[in-house]
Amino acid sequence: MVNNQGLAVFNKCYRMQILVTLTAHIMTLSHGIGLGWLSPTLLILQSPHTPLDFKVAVEDVSWIGSIFGIGSLCSNVFFGLTADRFGRKTNMYLLALPHMLFWILNYFAKSVEYLYAARFCAGLTSGGLYVVGPIFISEISDKEIRGALTSLAMMFYSCGILIGYILPSYLDYHVIPCIIIFLSIIYIIIMAFFPETPTSLVQRGKVEEAEIAFNFYKNLKPKKHLFVNELQSSSTLSEFEDLKASKLQGGKTAPISLGDFLNRTALKKFALAFVLCTQNQFSSSFAIVNYMSHIFAESGSTMDPSKCTIIAGIVQIMCTLLATLLVERFGRKSLMLLSTAGMALGMFSFGAFVQFTDETTKAEYNWVPLLAVAFVTATASFGVISLTFTIIVEILPAKIRPQAQSIAMMYCSVMVFTTLKLYPYFLFNLGISITMYSCAGSCVITGIYLLFFLPETKGKSMVQD
């Protein structure tokens, strides 16, 4: 068995799964660069030294941030409708189109409306990534490494954000889009060499193609040579038969009805998914990424906001990698609860420091805001950021997973819009302390719910509920 062969991730039968996952995450990396790039760039666009022919006002900042959620919502609906109809791979291709348009619009920006449209396109990519991406990766992955591969998305996302934080300090505004857009082209070319997921092919009645794809992702020899390795043959053949049985009825795709969404079990899983999405956004894990430079600028710290942002980005990468290494050892629930508690503690402490210290103390201990944000970012990275969407995919009913994932991400997109629209108001009008206390309170409330109702999904089969 895998456990007797050393670390599961190094087993040769997982090589293609890892290779395809790394390829899929080229888009995750590129999207992360776009998100990270926004934070320092907004400060530049608000300064007298803006590289554009116009300046960005504070009100514009909130709309540039929040319109991302509208794009994500539209994308959730689109990819939810097309995930089964066109297959996972086609939808993975489509992710590159709005992302390239994002960089093109930023390059040619003549007014703030161009930036609005660009962020809308970024939202389109994000919505698709969180609907199709987790499903695509989970359907090609063995359960022994599924958690590691799906959480790996957040490591690429974090690396992209860090790169985005750094680039504006060293490259001209108009140079960056010219470089990053080539990542999308590379992504499309490499993805062409990989087959559709076996699950999607079975759902569309393409059983022979599904078996070929199944063997490809298991790194097995052609069917006529399948019994060369007896250990592989018994388990993989059984697994493929289980896949066919779960997706087919009499050789036809099992029909989906409204009752599949409204039964008691499904509604409980939807409720849990909505709580996870609420926690992910109201904890400010995503808002901090978008407004990190502004947070440091408003905290009273005399340290350079751009350098602080880069340091926090490095911390996020390290802890996201930690989640990838620990998720299959300690499970999803324990890491999620620890992450939630850590975020609450960090934000309460940050808010208290800003509220109860004078300017002299803030100047003397100007490193405290960096430490606080780094701690919040670190604890968010190994749970709330890296595992939320992995868990959602795993808890949703297998029969309606693409549609249910789309519905959950639609709700998440509404939360994204709400959070990114309100966060600047809280930050600039109510102050950092109230902002941090509010987000910490959200962590406490959702954390208590998850403590009692979140199941452990480590090792859960993706073809069964």
Image: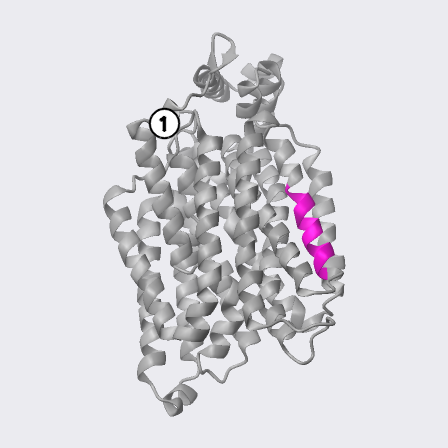
Tell me what residue is drawn at x 70 percent, y 32 percent.
193
> Residue pushed farthest top?
250
Is residue 227 rendered to the left or right of residue 50?
left
The correct choice, above or below, for 214 with respect to 47 in the image is above
Q: Which stretch did the figure color magenta?
A: 95-106
Tell me what residue is drawn at x 61 percent, y 52 percent.
120
Q: Position of residue 110 (x, y in %)?
A: 74, 64
Is residue 107 rendered to the left or right of residue 210?
right
Is residue 189 rendered to the left or right of residue 74?
right
Can residue 166 be spotted in the picture?
A: yes
* Depth order, front residue of 279/150: 279
Q: Where is residue 145 in the image (x, y as percent from the top left)?
A: 46, 38
* Depth order, front residue of 20/8: 20
Please name the residue that numbered disc 1 is placed on. Answer: 465
- The answer to if 354 sits in the magenta stretch is no
Q: Position of residue 389 (x, y in %)?
A: 44, 44
Amino acid residing under circle 1: Asp
The quadrant the C terminus occupies is top left
The quadrant the N terminus occupies is top left
The kind of secondary structure element at disc 1 is loop
